[in-house]
Image (cartoon, rainbow, N blue to C red):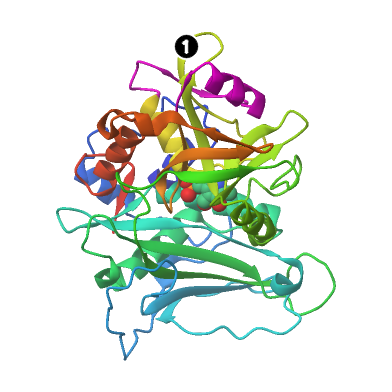
């Protein structure tokens, strides 16, 4: 088993392994170089039939685009994309990096009809030393593999895919913004290309990766977001696909998002069950920093019980803060009733969302059962907020200011 594959297993998503070595430990460059190496087997060492990064064919664009300073998310795509085809009869084909271009799909394609598809989202950052780093990419690779299993799409060697992505980022590295607050967003996508209307396990599929520039949503001066909490809509349910990154989870959330806006809120606070459990905010995991019912200072987030997307930022925050001391970092259920009581008793310090897109997003108010609940974080000095401390710790790692084995050098 390759070293990096082992690391990806270490960085599993249970969220219970807070004491893994993966915090701001000194990142020894040779170790990173070592982790940038690929296994040379096409089967991977865990016997998964897979494509090989060593076979990658690169067809560079003859007309690279002018790089505009446009940071509107998801609009400025880089010059190249990675694509890898799979068929049941022939297995994985040679990975190809080619100029970004349209796909040609049969109109019966089952990704379009039945949502047999999934995606990932991760970022590459240009550090103060001008080197490009990807943040904890093996966690995205393993989450992608879990989503693929859930979607009946074929398995692949996660290390081989990461090396193909590294080569893509390397080729388009000029697109990685030079400003610390911006980054390159990497969007691996995996779709069934089955061209028949029968609902069945795909016999052909396409894995592709596109990239675009992204701004940072987090800014110390940023207004905290407002959330609409109503049990009328459900994002995920036990036995469903809410813990996987499958497109249907997001398309299905759009109407609720628009209703939240009708109530003057920016995002949905997703509730679950008769006791109105707090689960996620928009497409972010959620954290509550408070004095709990036992009088303890706690940073709490709901457990990964099948209805929560196992966020890489969530996992990183739990792993970081559990080592800081001064408060407990806990995975536990939180209900709207508990939040309301804690607000009345002035036990709430901060509430925030976490995710690759925004990193940390403070929550300012929640509209629930006809009332606006104000989250008191804005009364604190910015510098004394936990959100500021976490954002700084993560940014320092992402930009190479703090040495860490959480970054993967391109
Ligand atoms: C539903 C949902 N929750 C949480 C997250 C945060 O996950 P991550 O920190 O890996 O970006 C995302 C984003 O991927 C998401 O789509």
Q: Residue at x 71, y 59 (%)?
A: 152
> Would you place residue 372 above or below residue 179 in this image?
above
Q: Secondary structure at mark 1?
A: loop
Of 225 and 271, the residue lying toward us: 225
Indicate yes or no whether the magenta region holds residue 332.
Answer: yes
Farthest residue to the top: give it: 294
Q: Label 1 neighbourhood size at 10 Å, few (<14), some (14-19), many (20+)?
A: few
Residue 393 x, y percent position in the rendering: 28, 37
From which residue to which does the magenta span run?
A: 322-349
Location of residue 163 by image quarter? bottom left
> Would you place residue 43 above or below residue 54 in this image?
above
Residue 228 x, y percent position in the rendering: 61, 45
Q: Residue at x 76, y 81 (%)?
A: 108
Indicate yes or no whether the magenta region holds residue 61.
Answer: no
- Left or right: 240 in relation to 320: right
- Left or right: 410 in relation to 109: left
Residue 46 in sight from this viewpoint = no
Location of residue 410 by image quarter? bottom left
Residue 101 in sight from this viewpoint = yes
> Would you place residue 280 above or below residue 161 in this image?
above
The residue pinned by badge 1 equals: 296
> Would you place residue 62 above or below residue 167 in this image?
below
Q: Residue at x 53, y 16 (%)?
A: 345
Farthest residue to the bottom: give it: 62
- Left or right: 378 in relation to 193: left
Residue 299 x, y percent position in the rendering: 46, 24
Residue 369 x, y percent position in the rendering: 69, 36
């Amino acid at each position: 088993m390759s070293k990096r594959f082992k690391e990806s297993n270490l960085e599993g998503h249970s969220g219970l392994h807070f004491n893994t070595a993966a915090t701001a430990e000194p990142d020894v460059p040779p170790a990173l170089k070592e982790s940038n190496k690929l296994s040379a087997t096409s089967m991977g060492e865990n016997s998964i039939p897979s494509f090989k990064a060593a076979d990658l064919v690169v067809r560079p664009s003859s007309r690279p685009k002018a790089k505009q300073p446009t940071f509107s998310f998801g609009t400025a795509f880089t010059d190249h994309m990675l694509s890898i085809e799979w068929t049941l009869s022939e297995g994985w084909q040679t990975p190809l990096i080619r100029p970004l271009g349209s796909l040609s799909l049969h109109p019966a394609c089952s990704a379009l009809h039945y949502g047999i598809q999934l995606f990932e989202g991760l970022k590459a950052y240009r550090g103060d030393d001008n080197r490009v780093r990807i943040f904890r990419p093996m966690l995205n690779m393993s989450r992608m593999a879990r989503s693929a299993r859930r979607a009946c799409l074929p398995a692949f060697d996660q290390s081989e895919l990461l090396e193909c992505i590294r080569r893509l980022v390397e080729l388009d590295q000029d697109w990685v913004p030079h400003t610390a607050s911006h980054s390159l967003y990497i969007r691996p996508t995996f779709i069934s290309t089955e061209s028949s209307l029968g609902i069945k396990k795909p016999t052909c599929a396409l894995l592709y990766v596109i990239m675009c520039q992204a701004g940072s949503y987090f800014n110390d001066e940023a207004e905290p977001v407002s959330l609409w909490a109503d049990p009328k809509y459900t994002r995920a349910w036990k036995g469903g696909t809410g813990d996987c990154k499958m497109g249907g989870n997001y398309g299905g959330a759009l109407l609720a998002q628009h209703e939240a806006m009708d109530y003057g809120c920016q995002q949905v606070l997703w509730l679950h069950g008769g006791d109105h459990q707090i689960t996620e905010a928009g497409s972010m995991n959620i954290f509550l920093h408070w004095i709990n019912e036992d009088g303890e200072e706690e940073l709490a987030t709901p457990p990964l019980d099948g209805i929560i997307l196992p966020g890489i930022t969530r996992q990183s925050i739990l792993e970081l803060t559990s080592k800081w001391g001064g408060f407990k970092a806990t995975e536990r259920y939180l209900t709207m009733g508990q939040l309301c009581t804690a607000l009345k008793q002035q036990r709430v310090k901060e509430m925030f969302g976490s995710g690759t897109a925004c990193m940390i997003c403070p929550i300012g108010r929640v509209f629930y059962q006809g009332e606006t609940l104000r989250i008191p974080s804005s009364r604190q000095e910015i510098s004394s907020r936990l959100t500021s401390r976490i954002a700084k710790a993560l940014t320092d790692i992402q930009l190479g200011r703090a040495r860490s084995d959480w970054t993967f050098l391109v």
